[in-house]
Amino acid sequence: MKFLLLGRKPIMNQSEEIEYYHVTFSGDTIKQKLAQVNYTAAISQLVHTFNLNNTLEGKKAWIKVDQQALMHADLTLLSQDVFIFYFMKLRNVDEDLLVKIEQLIDLGYEFVLESGVANSLMQTKGVQYLAKFSSVVFDGRDGKSYAKVVSVLNTQGVKSTIKNVLTQASYDIYQAEGFTYFMGSFFKEAKIIKGREISASRLKLLDLLRMLKTEAEMEDIITAIKLSPSVSLQLLQFINSANSHTTRTVESIKDATTLLGRRKLTSWVTMSLYASSESQIPPALVDSSIARAHLMELLCDLLNVSQLKDQAFIVGFLSLADTVFKVYLETILERGRFSQEVHEALVNGKGDLAKLLRIAKVIESGNIKNLEIISKKIKVPALKFSELLADAYTYVIESKAVFGSES
């Protein structure tokens, strides 16, 4: 059986920085017992196939383990420096199981527990027993207040995590209740500031992105950069920094653009749009926006519509622009002078670009049922979506490593 990488979902702390990733794979959702496969071999396959160690950017990954895997798989083959075991379901409190968990904890492995599992252990072993575990995970869809139970866990030194946090309002509530970690798409929710305008420097960068992705002549692009002193200064500062690996001092915009080339210049402009933000942008939002833009490009190649790649990148990038810039999307599209096709895709959900965006969102969601539906509809193996997702993550990592983000 081949396991599919469904995603690396950010787990954020109270500062909205990424603390861990929840790595999901097809065994999490399809009706197949993990005991029917070699669990550790399957995880090792994921690590190798999708270059998971690099994808995690030095952060630990939460991965699901069930009772069968705990009892029958050799989990010590997985590195405790990379993985944290996420125990989501417990059929019964079995002493042999608890011994196995405690042995793994003694070896330096960490466990996080779904609230139902934690409740079963607490009823059987007492609340003090939970001190062995790193975190307990609650579900934000329940709409409950967890302040009291979070307080109890704090007395045991156990951190609380809330998943399925879908709105900023929910995030604010759960943060006030004392949760340490947050999982969900709340960071993608647009928080528009009425009357806010796009800054002149950001408008220039958006214009450059449009030019780069509409095959404008390089001479015209160079002229546009020269007409913006702030962008010219930023570009020269970058090209003469250690990250650019240039061996001589560059003092002209023409030389800088020549050394970078069109593709790297596009990446620099994209990252600079985040760095020029007037307010802090959650790292998970930066990652999501860049990954989606590149995923849209990859889909164009996969579906033999490469002629749409440049516009697809822009649609993917701009699909989260209202959240990034806190400005209405229509305003961004109007000020940025983007094409009617881009406007139709983002505002009205029409056209081939809109279809690509919908596919990209399904891939990002990690919903195996929807992936299988899309797979059949466009006649592409679901495994290919995992490969595209891993490529998109790698693109994000490489872009940040070279061009950075000061957001």
Image (cartoon, rainbow, N blue to C red):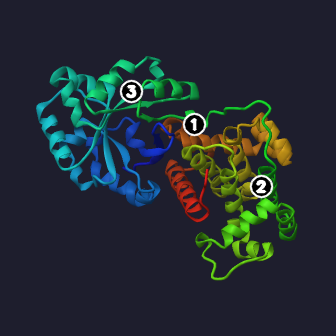
- CA separation, marks 1 and 3? 18 Å
Q: Which of marks 3 and 2 precedes in the sequence?
A: 3
The image quadrant of residue 243 is bottom right
**Compared to 50, does 360 lie above or below?**
above
The residue under the point 60% across, 37% down is: 188
Whole-percent x, y for residue 323 in the image = 67, 38
| Mark toward the start of the polypeptide (1 vs 3) | 3
Within 10 angstroms of label 1, few (less than 14), some, or many (20 or more) residues?
Answer: many
Provide the secondary structure element on which disc 3 rests. Answer: strand
Q: Residue at image x 27%, y 33%?
A: 157
- Mark 2: few/some/many CA within 10 Å (<14, 14-19, 20+): many
Three-letter code for the amino acid on which mark 3 is drawn: Phe
Return the x and y of residue 27 as percentages of the image width and height: 37, 41
Which mark is first along the chain, 1 or 2?
1
Real-space Cα separation, disc 2 to disc 3, in angstroms: 41 Å
Q: Secondary structure at mark 1?
A: helix
Q: Is residue 193 left or right of residue 403?
A: right
Q: Quadrant of residue 20?
A: top left
Q: Amino acid at mark 1?
A: Phe
Q: What secondary structure is found at the residue carrying circle 2?
A: helix
- Residue 187's tag is 1
Residue type pointed to by label 2: Leu
- Which residue has dot 3 on it? 138
Label at residue 121: none
Q: Are marks 2 and 3 in contact (CB under 8 Å)?
A: no
- The answer to whether residue 210 is seen in the rendering is yes
Q: Which residue is denoted by mark 2 in the rendering? A: 205
* CA gap, disc 2 and disc 1: 23 Å
Image x and y of residue 383, in percent: 49, 51
**Mark nearer the viewer, 2 or 3:** 2
Instruction: From the viewer's perspective, tell me whether residue 345 is left or right of residue 2.
Output: right
